[in-house]
Image: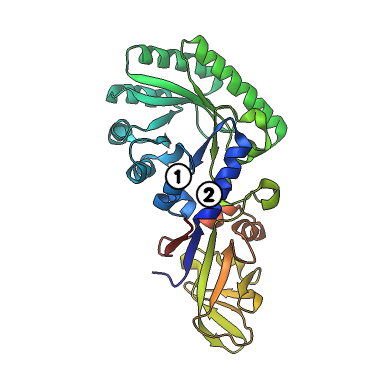
């Protein structure tokens, strides 16, 4: 186990969820919980989200979907957009998950497995991450309609990702998405759920919200690098990485956290931590321990706030220093770092 601790404030999380739900209403929020709820821990996070009224969870893959189902039981709707092989497809049906489908071959595999799986058909609206190409979409939705008529699947949604590269690119993606929905309806499908936007577009542009907004980072208080501030978004970080002082060596204080815990070594000399005497610069990041500028009366056992909610810098602040995004810093946090939870 690490000497550091990641403390998660569930009340702050609930406030972020409330801000997201208010911002995108009347669309619903799908809370994205990929990568163990952005490394914050699935069971406590989804339990609190359910108590706050969230009914949709974006689980990315089948194992994550299973973890959410085990935590919350039968009622939540859980959307996964990655499934491999017959065993996982059978698990989708057994766990009563919704599945994103952006490939004609996968559609046939789902039908062959049986179970009348609920599917959300994905068009490639311009990100080119996956999804059915627009020129292949009419034949794809015709085939989906045939499979739905014989009871092999149930088409409940149409969805896509956008690149969020520019307003013009996003507008083009939205036009492609709207056309795809119309073509699905012309094929005889009646999808009741449309979802296109993730956190940034959901907050910034009302026309992208449709029926569901897939919001992950913002609910955890991770703002976009180079984008609006926490205050502008109405969110705040929910976790704080803390490390104990383990030794005092002259002008340096040694703290119990390092790169093996997930703290990027490239941050050495570039950011301050919050100590009992105020902000101090991190001078070295080792594998399991790091060094910080000393302060009067520094002593083993004192706690240092490394980054996050109660620290001098957030995950995104650190990310901007090394040319990446806040999610990358948050997701680096090792499972060996214990998580503790505060809040009702």
* Front position in the image: 159 or 202: 202
Picture quadrant of residue 175: top right
Residue at 38 percent of width and 20 percent of height: 154
The earlier-in-sequence mark between 1 and 2 is: 2
Q: Residue at x 64, y 79 (%)?
A: 277
Image position of 10 (left or right of 237): left
Any part of residue 228 in sight? no
- Name the image quarter holding the N terminus: bottom left
Q: Are marks 1 and 2 in contact (CB under 8 Å)?
A: yes
The mark found on residue 150 in the picture is: none
Q: Residue furthest bottom?
A: 250
* Image x and y of residue 65, in percent: 38, 40
Q: Residue at 59% across / 65% down in the picture?
A: 310
Q: Which residue is mark 2?
A: 14
User: 267 and 16: which one is in front?
Assistant: 16
Look at the picture and state if 337 lies above or below 24: below
Mark 2 Cα-neighbour bin, 10 Å: few <14, some 14–19, many ≥20: many
Measured as percent of width and height from the top left, residue 131 is found at 50, 28
Task: Please name the residue that numbered disc 1 is placed on.
Answer: 51
Position in image of residue 27 (x %, y %): 57, 30
Number of on-image labels: 2
Q: Quadrant of residue 328?
A: bottom right
- Asked if 299 appears above or below 3 in the picture, the reply is below
Separation (CA) of disc 1 from disc 2: 9 Å
Say which of 247 and 322 sits in front.
Answer: 247
The outermost residue toward the front is 344
Image: 179 above or below 163: above
Query: Could you tell me residue 253's position as x and y percent?
Result: 57, 82
């Amino acid at each position: 186990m690490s000497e550091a601790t990641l403390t998660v404030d569930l009340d702050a999380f609930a406030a972020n969820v409330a801000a997201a739900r208010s911002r995108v209403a009347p669309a619903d929020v799908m809370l994205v919980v990929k990568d163990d709820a952005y490394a914050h821990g699935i069971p406590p996070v989804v339990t609190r989200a359910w108590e706050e009224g969230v009914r949709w969870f974006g689980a990315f893959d089948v194992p994550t979907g299973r973890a959410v189902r085990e935590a919350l039981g039968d009622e939540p709707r859980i959307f996964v957009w990655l499934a491999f092989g017959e065993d996982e497809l059978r698990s989708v049906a057994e766990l009563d998950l919704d599945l994103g489908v952006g490939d004609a071959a996968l559609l046939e595999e789902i039908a062959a497995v049986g179970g009348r799986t609920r599917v959300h058909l994905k068009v490639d609206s311009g990100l080119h991450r996956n999804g059915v190409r627009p020129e292949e979409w009419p034949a794809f939705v015709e085939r989906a309609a045939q499979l739905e008529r014989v009871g092999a699947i149930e088409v409940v949604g149409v969805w896509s990702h956008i690149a969020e590269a520019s307003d013009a690119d996003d507008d083009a993606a939205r036009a492609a998405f709207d056309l795809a929905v119309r073509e699905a309806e012309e094929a005889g499908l009646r999808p009741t759920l449309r979802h296109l936007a993730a956190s940034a577009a959901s907050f910034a542009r009302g026309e992208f919200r449709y029926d569901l907004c897939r919001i992950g980072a913002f609910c955890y208080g991770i703002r976009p690098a180079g984008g609006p501030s926490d205050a502008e978004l109405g969110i705040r970080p929910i976790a704080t990485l803390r490390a104990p002082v383990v030794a005092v060596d002259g002008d340096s204080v040694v703290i119990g956290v390092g790169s093996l815990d997930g703290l990027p070594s490239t941050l050495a000399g570039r950011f301050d931590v919050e100590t009992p005497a105020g902000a101090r610069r991190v001078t070295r990041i080792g594998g399991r321990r790091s060094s910080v500028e000393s302060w009067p009366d520094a002593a083993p056992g004192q706690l240092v706030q490394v980054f996050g909610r109660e620290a001098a810098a957030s995950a995104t602040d650190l990310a901007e220093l090394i040319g990446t995004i806040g999610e990358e810093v948050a997701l680096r946090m090792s499972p060996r770092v214990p998580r503790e939870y505060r809040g009702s």
